[in-house]
Amino acid sequence: MIDINNFKVEVSCEYKGETYSVRDNGAIMRHPKKACRIRPLDNKWTFGEKNEANGYMFFASNIRVHQVVASAFWGHQKAEGMVVDHKDTNRCNNRAENLHWVTKLENVLNNPITRRRIINICGSVAAFLENPTLLRDSSADPNFKWMRTVSEEEAAKCKANLERWSQEDTEFTGVPQGNGIGEWIYKEYQPVKQGDSVRQDWTQLSTQMPHACEQQEEMALPSLMESLTSNAMQEYWKTPTKFPLCPTDTISLEEYYSSLEIGKIFSNNTYGTNTIIEFAISDDGKQLCVATHNPEGLKQWYITYVYILGDKYIHKNGGSFFEENGALKTITLFQGKEWTGDDCIDDYC
């Protein structure tokens, strides 16, 4: 665990009406508001708490730490639609040198799933950036609709930035180098045996199992059970369930993702049928999040996470909700977006 006091540079910034002190190691401290009582989280240095739904570090439940750090060291959002990107893809690594502001187009090209689809359609990412109309004129996935409006000027700027980033690593004075990718400074996972455990070689698990603890060469996973679909298993999900959209001939989250569609049946068992209301794939392409509705349930709204382990699709129970907003909020946070909808009863349960 990195010492929160091990830093080289400390600066101050204003973010969403609050004043923060920010360190280059990714730690932040919120200052009390003038003429107001000190709140429980004021004057305390923190790296934030990890949101299991999307992997980002949060402060006070709704402030993304990486945005505060980027604003402090690299300035506030430069233009509408820009987002903070983690260079090493580790969302827990909020060290200042690991963050930079990027456009929506630049950010989406960091997604391996998106890159592969663009390559399939246009021949290469470079070809798309040279001529965005290649995507515009194709019968691409509807999820690419916004990208079809990319202008030649935007594409040219994106290409220039990507070429620059490939040749340099912008840094600020005083930042120590050679700390390794991500440093894995937040080790939140402690495996616990439950019933018949599944054991795998750690080298394989480190790339396949989310939230795995790197300190063990071999570890015990929570018990998994077979589902009613041949190459699918269930995690924290006791009722045998069928997953109609799960690919049966291949093991590919990209293919699974492409089969999802709002209104389609995602799962069914003795307790009813769940239809899709929203779905998303993680930035690294290693996990799906699916929000569903089952009118026969006491709680009618559900979240399921899907990832690959070996030659199986693992369907992990992500919780149930009394209100639709509860599920929609969860999948919104999974995507790293800010929830702007209303509160719901599930926030207080």
Image (tube, grey):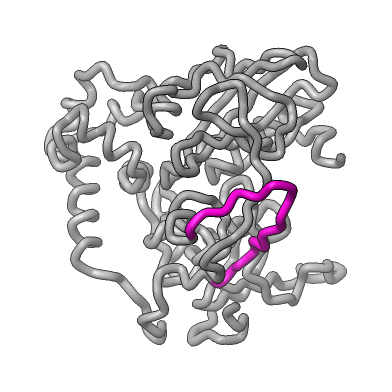
Instruction: Between residue 146 and residue 347, name the one nearer to us.
Output: 347
Instruction: Between residue 115 and residue 221, name the one nearer to us.
Output: 221
| Magenta residue span | 185-201
The percent coordinates of residue 210 (x first, y second) are 54, 51
The percent coordinates of residue 68 (x first, y second) are 56, 63
Q: Quadrant of residue 14?
A: bottom right
Left or right: 99 with respect to 10? left
Q: Residue furthest front?
A: 196
Q: Is residue 216 above or below residue 271?
A: below
**Residue at 48% across, 58% down:** 201
Q: Is residue 302 above or below residue 205?
A: above
Left or right: 220 with respect to 149? right
Q: Quadrant of residue 329?
A: top right
Q: Is residue 190 magenta?
A: yes
Q: Is residue 179 magenta?
A: no
The percent coordinates of residue 17 (x first, y second) are 66, 59
Quadrant of the drawing holding the C terminus: top right
Left or right: 135 with respect to 342? left
Quadrant of the drawing holding the N terminus: bottom right
Which is the main secondary structure of the residues drawn in magenta?
A: loop
**Residue at 34% across, 27% down:** 144
Instruction: Between residue 213 and residue 223, name the one nearer to us.
Output: 223
**Residue at 44% across, 20% down:** 259
What is the number of callouts on the image? Answer: 0
Instruction: Between residue 212 and residue 218, name the one nearer to us.
Output: 218
The percent coordinates of residue 198 (x first, y second) are 60, 49
**Residue at 72% across, 58% down:** 60
Whether residue 72 is visible, yes or no, is: no
Q: Is residue 7 above or below residue 285?
A: below
Whether residue 123 is visible, yes or no, is: yes
